[in-house]
Amino acid sequence: MTSDLTHQGISFDDTPLGFNTLSIHLGNGVDAETGAIRRPITLANAYALPYDPSDINWSSSDVNLYTRNGHPNQRYLEAKIARLEGAEDAVVLASGVAALAAVFTTFLNRGDHAIFSDTTYIAAYRLLNQILPEKYGIETSIVDTSDPENVARALKPNTKLVHIETPANPTLKVSDVAAIARLVHDHDADTLVSVDNTFNTPFNVRPLDLGADIVVESLTKYINGHGDALGGAIATTKARTDEIRFTAQVNYGGIISPFNAWLINRGSVTLPLRMRQHNASALAIARHLESLPQVRFVSYPGLESHPHHDVAVSQLARKDSGFGGVLAFGLDTDHDGHNRFVSKLNVITSAVSLGHDESLIVFLGEDDERQYLYPPEFHRGFFRLAVGLEDTDDLIRDIDHALAEAGL
């Protein structure tokens, strides 16, 4: 019988287990019934009750009761995410947006104030800029968080949450998590700092180590890595995850399906291998794009030309970390020229999302509702390129070929 130590992230000696080892073993184990060395998918939506169920807490997430309250595949994945993020606990929900909404609705009440990055994922922007203020009476402020002093100036006595997205989607703006966490906690130790770490993953950056209170990941992206399952995670203290489970999981019903949890757990075992390739290819492609006369600008934190490059370097979690697989760039052409370029690509696919095995590109035109918050170079339309796992040379050749075929 094999030892179960590594499946709990425990080393057999005093040497901590590495990120690769933890990615493979956490959330896994030997199935007690069959001896299978992979956790099975448990698709039941209800579980057998004890002889006398009259004293059961029907909102409990601690026992197998009803799948909306929690289920084994969710818990296996939560154990892995918590350890990879360096957190006491984690909650896994149905999507990244469900995770964002869970943080906002659990820890913000009517009359509270929240600060958020001026460039965020569109659903986070709508939640914080529109839905929470209009429907729930929560005051919000949009701030350029790449300068911590902007956050300091926006803090109020009723500020309860500061939400950072770094790098920001889709402009790749970087915020200094450690500096923001220090000034927020100096203002009020109870004010929470939440970081959307989707573009980085815990392989590249661990926000909790930098002083953040909560880290959010869209598991749909890099942690799953195969473009076939939705999920979101929140890593923080056990006291906070208990609140989130009660609010967002049991009573709002944002539970992840057992199958999606199993798929994401399966995909996550190769996270470190994939991130090394994403990091390396994205940096090579960003440097190549920067050298082309047809390219107006390139935004990628790994480039020395990026205005926040030094901050991005300072936040890396380990020696082999990098700057992620997403970059933004614009061509020196008009609206139709950008679309012609995409139509000539053969290896890179025109589709939303990121973190897949295949490279994905999306043209963001001049009418994006967040356009007024973007730097000027983004106003003529631009691309968000999510670099996949193809051979780097094939991706570069595809870009060069499409530029030529599009007459650019």
Image (cartoon, rainbow, N blue to C red):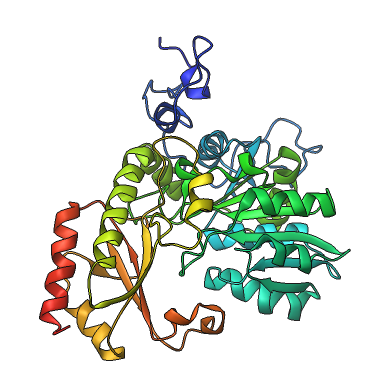
Q: Position of residue 191 (x, y in %)?
A: 80, 54
Corner quadrant of residue 340 = bottom left
Asked whether, in this view, residue 390 is left or right of residue 212, the answer is left
Q: Is residue 283 left or right of residue 233?
A: left
Q: Is residue 313 left or right of residue 352?
A: right
The reply to whether residue 357 is in sight is no
Image coordinates of residue 63 in percent, x first then y, are 66, 35
- Which quadrant would residue 336 be assigned to in this image? bottom left
* Outermost right residue: 157
Residue 371 % position (x, y): 51, 83
Can residue 274 be seen here? Answer: yes
Image quadrant occupied by the N terminus: top left
Of 54 and 274, the residue lying toward us: 274
- Which quadrant would residue 184 be assigned to in this image? bottom right
Q: How many marks?
A: 0
| Residue 30 shown left or right of residue 182 in the figure | left
Q: Nearer the viewer, residue 335 or 64?
A: 335
Q: Tell me the quadrant of the picture where the C terminus can be found.
A: bottom left
Residue pictured at 42% horizontal, 22% vertical: 30
Which of 46/194 is in front? 194
The image shows residue 197 at horizontal and vertical percentages of: 53, 53
**Which residue appears at 38% of the width and 41% of the height?**
271
